[in-house]
Amino acid sequence: MVAVDLGGTRMKCGLVAADGAVLHRETRPTPRTAGGRAVLDTLLETVVELSQKATADGHRVRAIGVVVPGIIDAETGTVVAENLAWSGTPVRAELIAAVGDDDVPIVLAHDVRAGGYAELRQGALTGTTNSLFLPLGTGIAAAMVVDGRLVSGDGYAGELGHTRFIHGETAELCACGQWGCLETVASAAAIARRYAARAGRVVDGSREVMELLAAGDEIAAQVWQDALTVLIEALVLYTTLLAPTRIAIGGGLVGAGETLLQPLRDGVHARLTFQREPEIVAAVLGEEAGCLGAALYAWDRVTSEEQS
Amino acid sequence: MVAVDLGGTRMKCGLVAADGAVLHRETRPTPRTAGGRAVLDTLLETVVELSQKATADGHRVRAIGVVVPGIIDAETGTVVAENLAWSGTPVRAELIAAVGDDDVPIVLAHDVRAGGYAELRQGALTGTTNSLFLPLGTGIAAAMVVDGRLVSGDGYAGELGHTRFIHGETAELCACGQWGCLETVASAAAIARRYAARAGRVVDGSREVMELLAAGDEIAAQVWQDALTVLIEALVLYTTLLAPTRIAIGGGLVGAGETLLQPLRDGVHARLTFQREPEIVAAVLGEEAGCLGAALYAWDRVTSEEQS
């Protein structure tokens, strides 16, 4: 199984066996600044080279799973993804042409939903039928498990990061064009950016802000509190609407551990009245979730084709 | 098919044929003030009498569908419903005992979800796979169609009326115990209550406020605008998270027609950036939606038991 998690800066690649064992891992840069065609060419090259490596190592490539941070049209296999400079790019057709083997099915899926699927099958959401995987990384998107199935919404669902939680004058413009989105305050990128704006100096990502927080820095405490406030609001809203029994927080921010999770639990607990209260836990698969999800989807496809 | 939509003030009852034709309709008062036991006894009596009537009219009762405004535990068949004074009441067991015929399956379901199911099968949401039925009545709950299925969330999902859209000092306490819920501003009951509070006189429900609005009353205009503002916020949020292609507004407020719908369409259109824009339409089944949904669920049960 060839699996690729194509991100805006890096592609995480793997060869994965039927039992989920990762036989090979590698990371390659995504040539985002060179444009959408360059990104696609690099993806095609990577998939072909990984397939050749698998064959050389004595494995049979049964399927190929690719996950991307964008909206995938399930019918046409085209992708819109700002981070990859793709606007309706025919990714599935190009992958099929590059692989050139009709017996190797190709699965194209959304990266966060694939990560959620991996958490559901092998991670923090195992055994749930209503749950949420919420990675807080450069951006924020959600993988939603509802009545036992991962929600797709024709590829459009799950944009919890782009719901408005900041109102009035303090709302910031989001990359999506809306104002006051969750992502503008509570993503790892937002925490670094907001600290830098207040402190008047560049920081080394959200990780440095967390270190400053631990050291008692007041600006870091304020930026962190702002993020907690909107995250609590978002989790209460999600719980009211979709009744998860478990919420797994992922992405870079969950590196803060209980400094993040305990205030979220306390804040959500204090707000709920009639709703069913979810467990709030850390996701367990980390950066591999997307790549593993790509492999799981690909194995599912092979299994379902064998059965049909 | 015996179908009962048990509301907090009235129960709407019907005998419904396999093709959806309503053979008989009647409405009975719900003895809410007499307590939960009285409500249950009245329900049992109603179901038995309707069954007898069906038999007397020469029909065979194939199943019984009852829908209620509460949280139904699918395993135990117990119901929590504040409007019916039920707190873990064993409704399914009591219905089975009262009917006393193992060959007549009993279906117990949530009223708004049943209404949404009727709109999906025979009404404004026909043909959709991702859509929303949002009745604006005494309260506000949502029936959510996601990836082709009506969401249950173990009976807890869909409480869009109890998400917070009013922040700060103007937030009002909701019956659910939270502050600033959508329902405190945009339900039919809230519109009447908020007008009365501002004008210093009691009004005859949201209908009178709508008449005042049409007549140019300034307080009515403000109360109406407040409702539109939070409804737009709620529809944008729902669209961002669950990507409906169509939203059907129901309940008493949709009696306002385009005075309600056109500002909602304009407001949602102006706010969306990357999201898929939903059609916003009026629900078409009106007050019968819940009762019809109860009958449809009951027929589904009969059909699935025949197939199994």
Image: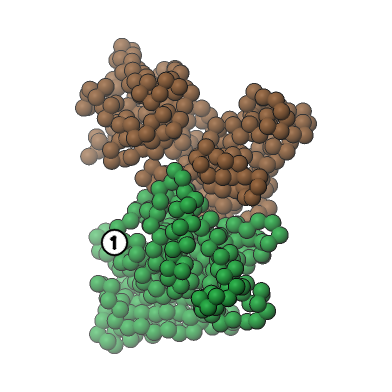
Chain colours: A green, B brown
State whether residue B85 is above or below residue A168: above
Q: Position of residue B294 (x, y in %)?
A: 39, 30
Choose between A37 and B181: the one closer to the eye.
Answer: B181
Choose between A124 and B127: the one closer to the eye.
Answer: A124
Q: Position of residue A31 (x, y in %)?
A: 54, 83
Q: Residue at x 29, y 84 (%)?
A: A55
Q: Residue at x 22, y 27 (%)?
A: B103
Residue B106: quadrant of the picture: top left
In which quadrant is the N terminus of chain A drawn? Answer: bottom left
Left or right of A59 in this view: B150: right
**Which residue sits furthest front?**
A216
Choose between B196 and B70: the one closer to the eye.
Answer: B196
Residue at disc 1, secondary structure? helix
Near mark 1 (Cα within 10 A), the count class, few <14, some 14-19 or many ≥20, is few
Q: Position of residue A280 (x, y in %)?
A: 40, 60
Q: Position of residue A127 (x, y in %)?
A: 30, 58
In which quadrant is the C terminus of chain A drawn? Answer: bottom left
State whether residue A8 is above or below residue B6: below
Q: What is the chain letter for disc 1?
A: A
Residue corresponding to mark 1: A304
Indicate the amino acid at tag 1. Ser
Q: Residue at x 30, y 31 (%)?
A: B90
Choose between A26 and A52: the one closer to the eye.
Answer: A26
State whether residue A303 is above or below residue B223: below
Answer whether residue A307 is visible to the viewer in this image: yes
